Each structure stands twice: as structure tokens, then as C-alpha cells.
Image: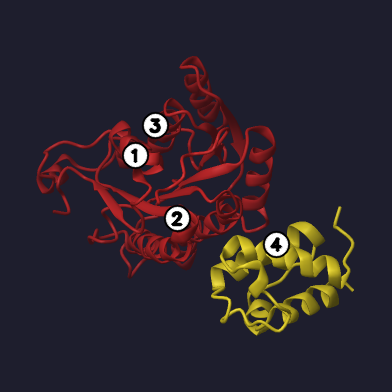
Chain colours: A red, B yellow
């Protein structure tokens, strides 16, 4: 008995896909035959650029606006809209994430709350909504973009670390809940990846990375692409580190 | 548009769903417990989704925790659709 293959017309929803890792993930999934919902909060231009790149390569995608940190039914709206436009949403990549750094002694409640809301709570709400079509289809892929930060310390990011560590915990538990329905839930934990989010990180940080270079969004996207594929049907509850050896 | 909520219709919906989850149709009686039928919490969560899609009746986690038999499930749906 093996995992059934991906159904026709299957759609992937990638949150925060207007740039960086999210955009690279959207492009990689489309190259693998997924229809893709390119979610953005405010960067419509970036999302449309991602859609265009997908279409020029022969894929199918739509830009879809929604702030996943908004508790008021945004998850349901995104899924319902995408299902109507492209087909059943059978892959979800919880990529949308923010930082609001500061030492714990100085972090304001608002900084803590917004990072937890966007990076962890939103991922939970989206995953909860994703279970509907995936369980029904007996096929699903949830990939949570976590981080080396969380499993590892990073001073100034207690909120980010808590959210990302929480995301890994949530990944494991939800994975065990739905495994018998052919739905896998995994995390990808990027290290230092060359994107806008990591622009200001000093070069000295590379000393901690055995590969002595930042990773690329495409290298993270390749890991997501694998986990979303039919080949990864027996991989669930796991965290794949894409970090140049940093957490080894 | 929700289907008409009669006990007979709901029972058919519940039976058809349970058969998908594994139990043999002949083993499913109104007095059968979910435990006897080897129907677990994920199966019941999926049953709730099927009920909601078919009848517009939303069953929450705490509702599902209280129903023990097939008959309990039918009665609850009919009552909620009331």
C-alpha cells in the first residue's frame, strides 16, 4: 500500500510569496506542476512579478491578497477563493513571517504579539483550514517554513525563536494527527539565506556557518519542492534544515 | 443548500461516512459505539466536516467528544438542525 499520487488540478498556496523564499518556493512548485496561489499582504507588485515568472515558464498562478495574521476569517477566504479559481488546495506553505527584534528585557508586548501572531498563530489557522480539502482528498502537503533560530538561540530574537520553535512542535503533532489520511506535515528550517530579511546581518556571522556562505532562496525552495512531491509521501513530522551545516 | 434533515437521511449520511473509514456496513447499528467500530477522533472530525457540508450543521470538538454511538451522532445532528 503506498501513498496515492497528487490529484489533477492540485493547487499550492504559498503565504508571503511576493519576494524572497516565498517567491522562490512558488516558482519551484509551479515548475513541478502545481497551480500556485501567490499570497501577499501588501506587496502586490512583488506578487504579480512572481505570478508573471511562473506564467512565463508555462505554469499557472494567481496573486491572492490577504494578511494571514488577521484572525477574521482570512484563512477561510484565501482557501475558498483559491479553490474557486484554481482547484483544490492540497499544498500549503506557511512562509509568511516577520521579525521585530530586541533583547527580551526590552521587547514590548506588541513586538512579541505580532511576531507570534504572524509566524505561529497564522500558520496554525491556515493549517486548520487546509485540513478540510486535504483530508477529503486523502492527499495533502503542509510545509512550515521554520528557522535554525528556535532550535538554536539568537540573542535579540526571543519572539522569533519562540514562534519558530513552536512551529516545529506544531508540525510534529499535526503530522501525527493526519498521517493516516495521506497528509504530510513537515518543516523546513533555513539558516542564513540571502534575502531582504537578512540584509543587515554582519559578515562575521558567517563564521558560524560551516559552508561559509549564505544560502539562496532557491536552495530552500528545492527542499520545499521535495517535501511537496509524491516522492516525499512517507516523510512527515520532520524538520529539514537548509543551513550550510550550522545546526549540525 | 443543505439537504433535508430527517433522521433517516442523517443516518444514511453517517453510515456512508463510517464505511469510508473502515467499518463494514453490516456492523454499523444505531447502538454501535464508535469505539466498537474502531472509529477514532480523526474519523469523527472528518464526519463533522461531512455533516457540515451536507446539512450546514456545525459540530464543535466538544460536541464530538460527547457522542459515543452512531445513534448519538444522528440525534445530535437532527437536534442541531432543528
**Marks 2 and 1 share the same chain:** yes
From the viewer's perspective, is the residue at label 2 or at label 4 nearer?
4
| Callouts 2 and 3 in the same chain | yes
**Residue shown at 33% from the left, 70% from the top:** A105
Tag in front: 2 or 1 = 1
- Residues flagged by tags 2 and 4 on a common chain: no
Residue B58 falls in which quadrant of the image? Answer: bottom right
Q: Secondary structure at mark 3?
A: helix
Identify the residue position indicated by label 3 in the image: A24
Q: Nearer the viewer, residue A158 or A77?
A: A77
10 Å crowding of disc 3: few (<14), some (14-19), many (20+):
many
Callout 2–callout 3 Cβ contact below 8 Å: no
Say whether residue A66 is left or right of residue A13.
right
Q: Residue at x 70, y 60 (%)?
A: B50
Residue A89 at x, y percent in the picture:
57, 43
Between the C-alphas of marks 2 and 3, the distance is: 19 Å
- How many discs appear? 4
Badge 3: chain ID: A
Residue A72 located left or right of residue A53: right
Q: Which mark is residue A119?
A: 2
**Which sits in the foreground, A30 or A139?**
A139
Q: Give how far apart the Cα atoms at labels 4 and 3 are.
A: 42 Å
The label number, if any, that marks residue B16 in the structure image: 4
Amino acid at each position: 500500500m503506498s501513498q496515492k499520487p497528487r490529484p489533477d488540478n492540485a493547487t499550492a498556496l504559498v503565504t508571503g510569496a511576493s519576494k524572497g523564499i516565498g517567491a522562490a518556493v512558488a516558482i519551484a512548485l509551479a515548475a513541478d506542476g502545481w497551480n500556485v496561489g501567490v499570497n501577499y499582504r501588501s506587496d502586490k507588485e512583488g506578487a504579480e512579478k512572481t505570478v508573471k515568472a511562473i506564467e512565463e515558464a508555462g505554469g499557472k498562478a494567481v496573486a491572492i491578497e490577504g494578511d494571514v495574521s488577521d484572525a477574521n476569517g482570512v484563512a477561510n477566504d484565501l482557501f475558498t477563493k483559491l479553490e474557486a479559481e484554481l482547484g483544490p488546495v492540497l499544498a500549503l506553505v506557511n512562509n509568511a513571517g516577520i521579525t521585530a527584534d530586541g533583547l527580551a528585557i526590552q521587547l514590548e508586548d506588541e513586538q512579541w504579539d505580532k511576531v507570534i501572531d504572524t509566524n505561529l498563530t497564522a500558520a496554525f489557522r491556515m493549517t486548520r483550514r487546509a485540513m478540510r480539502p486535504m483530508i477529503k482528498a486523502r492527499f495533502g502537503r503542509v510545509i512550515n517554513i521554520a528557522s535554525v533560530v528556535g532550535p538554536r538561540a539568537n540573542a535579540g530574537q526571543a519572539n522569533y525563536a519562540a514562534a519558530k520553535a513552536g512551529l516545529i512542535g506544531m508540525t510534529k503533532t499535526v503530522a501525527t494527527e493526519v498521517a493516516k489520511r495521506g497528509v504530510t506535515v513537515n518543516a523546513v528550517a533555513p539558516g542564513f539565506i540571502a534575502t531582504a530579511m537578512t540584509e543587515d546581518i554582519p559578515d562575521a556571522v558567517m563564521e558560524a556557518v560551516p559552508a561559509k556562505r549564505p544560502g539562496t532562496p532557491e536552495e530552500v525552495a528545492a527542499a520545499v519542492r521535495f517535501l511537496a512531491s509524491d516522492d516525499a509521501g512517507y516523510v512527515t513530522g520532520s524538520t529539514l534544515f537548509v543551513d550550510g551545516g550550522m545546526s549540525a | 443548500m443543505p439537504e433535508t434533515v430527517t433522521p433517516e437521511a442523517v443516518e444514511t449520511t453517517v453510515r456512508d461516512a463510517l464505511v469510508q473509514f473502515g467499518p463494514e456496513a453490516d456492523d454499523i447499528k444505531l447502538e454501535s459505539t464508535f469505539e466498537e467500530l474502531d472509529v477514532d477522533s480523526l474519523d469523527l472530525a472528518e464526519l463533522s466536516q461531512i455533516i457540515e457540508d451536507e446539512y450546514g450543521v456545525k459540530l464543535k470538538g466538544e460536541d464530538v467528544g460527547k457522542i459515543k454511538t452512531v445513534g448519538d451522532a444522528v440525534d445530535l445532528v437532527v437536534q442541531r438542525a432543528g
